[in-house]
Image (cartoon, rainbow, N blue to C red):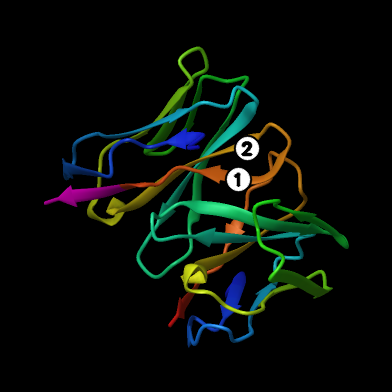
Amino acid sequence: DQQVKQNSPSLSVQEGRISILNCDYTNSMFDYFLWYKKYPAEGPTFLISISSIKDKNEDGRFTVFLNKSAKHLSLHIVPSQPGDSAVYFCAARGGGADGLTFGKGTHLIIQP
Amino acid sequence: DTAVSQTPKYLVTQMGNDKSIKCEQNLGHDTMYWYKQDSKKFLKIMFSYNNKELIINETVPNRFSPKSPDKAHLNLHINSLELGDSAVYFCASSQSPGPRETQYFGPGTRLLVL
């Protein structure tokens, strides 16, 4: 029962272009959403978050958009840089659960 | 300085053995967690521990027992290891258990049960 879904296992983007990573969720009790970035052999690193009362949060090159009615969020990275190549996990919190509920991740590859 | 550290980084062991994984955080956080990343790459919460209160995920077998000697440490002991326990185990911590609190993850412990 996947409550957080990332349907694209991988995404390839040219350096300098925009990377858009998508995430869908099914649990309407989720009220806080996060994106984590993970390099091989390391733990996930927090990137950006958004509360369910907002529809957009921006931090430098990273912007997260939330569409509550569609239960969809996306992470935009612009411009994409080689160091952005990593696995990106969408996570959600709320609904009584104490921990984070993660998606399976999307492997972003930035091509020179 | 490493904020959240785990030992060992790799653990290879035989089925039926008992093993422990250690986690330490130097962030002064009150809440710590254990997550399991299985072969399908899902990261799933196993436990959270806040100020001596343990919240157990019901799907975790009771062969898994977290132990917290103090606020900075949350160890994971696994009895009678099974093949299906092979996974990457991540420890994390946050300032408090609140839903807005950012969780900081350790580098993971790769457990392989033969």
Q: Nearer the viewer, residue B64 or A91?
A: B64
Q: Tag 2, which chain?
A: A
- Image coords of residue A7 (percent x, y): 32, 35
Q: Is residue A53 left or right of residue B71?
A: left
User: Which residue is farthest right?
Assistant: B52
Which is the main secondary structure of the residues drawn in magenta?
strand
Snapshot quadrant of residue B31: bottom right
Q: Tag 1, which chain?
A: A
Badge 2 element: strand
Residues shaded magenta: A107-112
Q: Nearer the viewer, residue A110 or B77?
A: B77
Snapshot quadrant of residue B29: bottom right
Q: Which residue is mark 2?
A: A93
Residue positioned 44% across, 30% down in the render = A64
Residue type indicated by callout 1? Leu
Q: Is residue B37 left or right of residue B68?
A: left
Q: Nearer the viewer, residue A95 or B112?
A: B112
Give the answer, above or below, for where A77 lies relative to B43. above
- Image coords of residue B40 (percent x, y): 38, 54
Badge 1 element: strand
Query: Is residue B86 at all visible to an observer of this figure?
Result: yes
Give the answer, above or below, for where A33 lies relative to B69. above
Q: Is residue A22 left or right of residue B43?
A: left
Q: Which residue is mark 1?
A: A100
Q: Are marks 2 and 1 in contact (CB under 8 Å)?
A: yes
- Image coords of residue B91 (percent x, y): 61, 65
Dot 2: within a 10 Å radius of its alpha carbon, few (fewer than 14), some, or many (20 or more) residues?
A: many
Residue positioned 73% across, 35% down in the render = A96
Residue positioned 35% across, 66% down in the render = A40
Disc 2 and disc 1: Cα gap in Å?
A: 5 Å
Dot 1: within a 10 Å radius of its alpha carbon, few (fewer than 14), some, or many (20 or more) residues?
A: many
Query: Is residue B1 at all visible to an observer of this figure?
Result: no
